[in-house]
Amino acid sequence: MTALSEAFGPVICAWCQKQLRVGDPIKPVSHGICLVCLGSVIDIPVEDVRHIPTEVLDALPFGVIRLSGEGTITGYNKMESSFSGLDPIRIIGKNFFREIAPCASGKEFAGKLEKLQSSRSDGRTEFKFVFKFPRGAMLVSIVIVYDSASDTAVILVKPKAEESNPC
């Protein structure tokens, strides 16, 4: 084990759960994004989804929403904007569950984030969800990565299929 890997916990891809870096198993796991899941956006894996630079965030081939512990939107990338039709500038600072996506405020979405928060430790959860947009519904794969130290979450969104009629 190298000095670098001894200083940190392991790093796991938030999407596919592939190990990106070996680390001290006693230290907390960090979530990043591997090269396969990044596509051709950048040539090195992201080792911490909480700190993706803005220029990379907007180039990612999937949606990214950053939330404070209270659900306030602190980041919203271009791909997510293309899914929702919402301008990131107009929604930053608003509550995701009350003002932007009330369809996500139930136990099947917000409840999963609340469960991560109540564990008081870093964590990850993955599930499928249907976002209801005015132009129709979209089935997506969601990954929520929660950071307990900062009480923040990063939501990763990949479309699975689109339906023409809203639910």
Image (tube, rainbow, N blue to C red):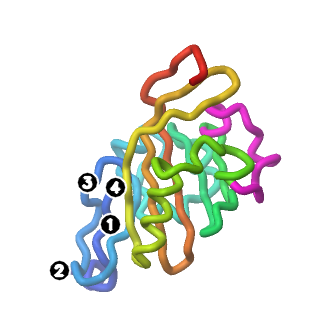
Q: Earlier in the sequence, mark 3 or mark 1?
A: 1
Quickly name the residue at label 2.
Answer: 1
* Residue at 49%, 60% in the rendered image: 113
Quickly name the residue at label 3.
Answer: 18
Q: Earlier in the sequence, mark 2 or mark 1?
A: 2
SS assignment at label 4 = strand
The answer to whether marks 2 and 4 mark residues whose Cβ atoms lie closer than 8 Å is no
Residue 13: give its label: 4
Q: What's the magenta region?
A: 80-95
Q: Earlier in the sequence, mark 3 or mark 2?
A: 2
Q: Give the side of residue 77 with respect to residue 157, left or right.
A: right
Badge 4, how many Cα within 10 Å: few under 14, some, many 20+?
many
* Residue at 60%, 51% in the rendered image: 65
In which quadrant of the rendered view does residue 103 lie?
top right
Q: CA distance from mark 4 to mark 3?
A: 5 Å
Q: Give the side of residue 64 with respect to residue 21, left or right.
A: right
Where is residue 136 shown, x and y percent of the image? 61, 21
